Image (tube, rainbow, N blue to C red):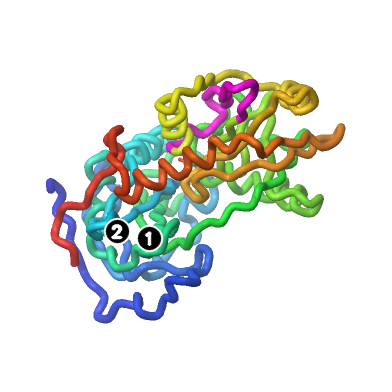
Amino acid sequence: MSYNIQITKVEQSRVDTLDFDNIPLGTSFTDHMFICDYDNGEWGNPRIEPLKPIPTHPAAMALHYGQAIFEGMKAYKDSDNIPMLFRPYQNAKRLNLSANRMGMPNVPEELFVEGLTELVALEHHWIPPQLGSALYLRPFMYADEAFIGMRAATRYKFIIMASPAGPFFSKRIKLWAEKQFIRAAQGGTGEAKAAGNYAAAIRPTELAKAKGYDQVLWLDAAEHKYIQEVGTMNIFFKINGEFITPKLDGSVLDGITRKSVIDLLQDKGYKVTERLIAIDEIKEASKNGTLEEAFGTGTAVGIAYIQSIGTDEGEIYISDESPVGIDVNDTLNAIKTGKIEDKFGWMTKIEQELA
Ligand SMILES: Cc1ncc(COP(=O)(O)O)c(C=O)c1O
């Protein structure tokens, strides 16, 4: 371990107050957080301390100019109770890609992963043992310099919080293909996990929900013709035996579940193509019976099956007779919990002494 992370522990853990069989969504947090400050061109004072509110100056630049980015990932336990992280260096790389786009400093990958591993080693008793549950980890960075004016901030905080997450029982979801609002345009911030991208999606998602849909299916900004992604998921279709997913063109988030699912599908012998996919192509495939399956992929849900896509011209129905995605999801979960061999080398075991 190369960083000298100072650890201040809570006097009394709150873990006994959590009902692991009924974990509330997004509202329970573990005892501690990892925190590190950026000032004078470098990261310093990496520490783990009791989770608590952070005093914020009203002129903190993140609040005005939106320099705020985040990551989402999960820690699991294997059958010997060893905590494990799923592809943490991928999240470190993506955080830095987001940081570059938003004019923010990079977090050294080793600091990112060391902060995660030290925090999870301390909070391992918060990892829910139930099948499908995990400890959700939220690394994020924001500008906390007090300054009114448009330029990159000079002071930032990088923080990691942890929140136990229950199993996600996915019903087949209904998507609304959005043509009025867009998520990302070429040259914009679509491939960054920037807080503002999510703010801009809130209203369109509310409107889609009011129409009876679960999530928005985002289309390209120029023509409203090509499929990008869904809410907080990438998307896959199976047409005539072949899987297709929108190519990464700078306006789609490079999902870590997406890249893992591509590897697993190929390993299982399926052809996977990353390319432009027009919504009309999906409509046609649904009509002529070649659309065999469609699902979203993301850290929160793993794989979420899609039932139908609503468009201005009517509903596109998706068959549920080819559940390859369920098989891929089972394989992914078995790798994440150490039940099958990790032949891709995706899991990082937390080897240090557990608190
Ligand atoms: C916009 C968006 N697309 C896709 C994803 C899926 O990415 P991942 O598989 O890394 O969770 C997410 C979730 O982070 C997301 O927010």
What label does residue 266 carry, if any? none
Tell me, yes or no, whether the highlighted magenta stretch contains residue 242. yes
The range drawn in magenta is 237-256
In the image shown, does 307 or 64 lie closer to the viewer? 307
121 versus 40 height, above or below: below
In the image shown, does 310 or 116 lie closer to the viewer? 310
In the image shown, does 52 or 331 lie closer to the viewer? 331
What label does residue 34 carry, if any? 2
Crowd around label 1: few <14 · some 14–19 · many ≥20 (10 Å):
many
Residue found at the far front of this picture: 321
Residue sitting at x 47%, y 42%: 329
- Can residue 76 be seen here? yes
Q: Position of residue 245 (x, y in %)?
A: 57, 26
Q: Position of residue 278 (x, y in %)?
A: 70, 22
Query: Residue type at mark 1?
Result: Ala
Residue sitting at x 39%, y 39%: 95
First along the sequence among labels 2 and 1: 2
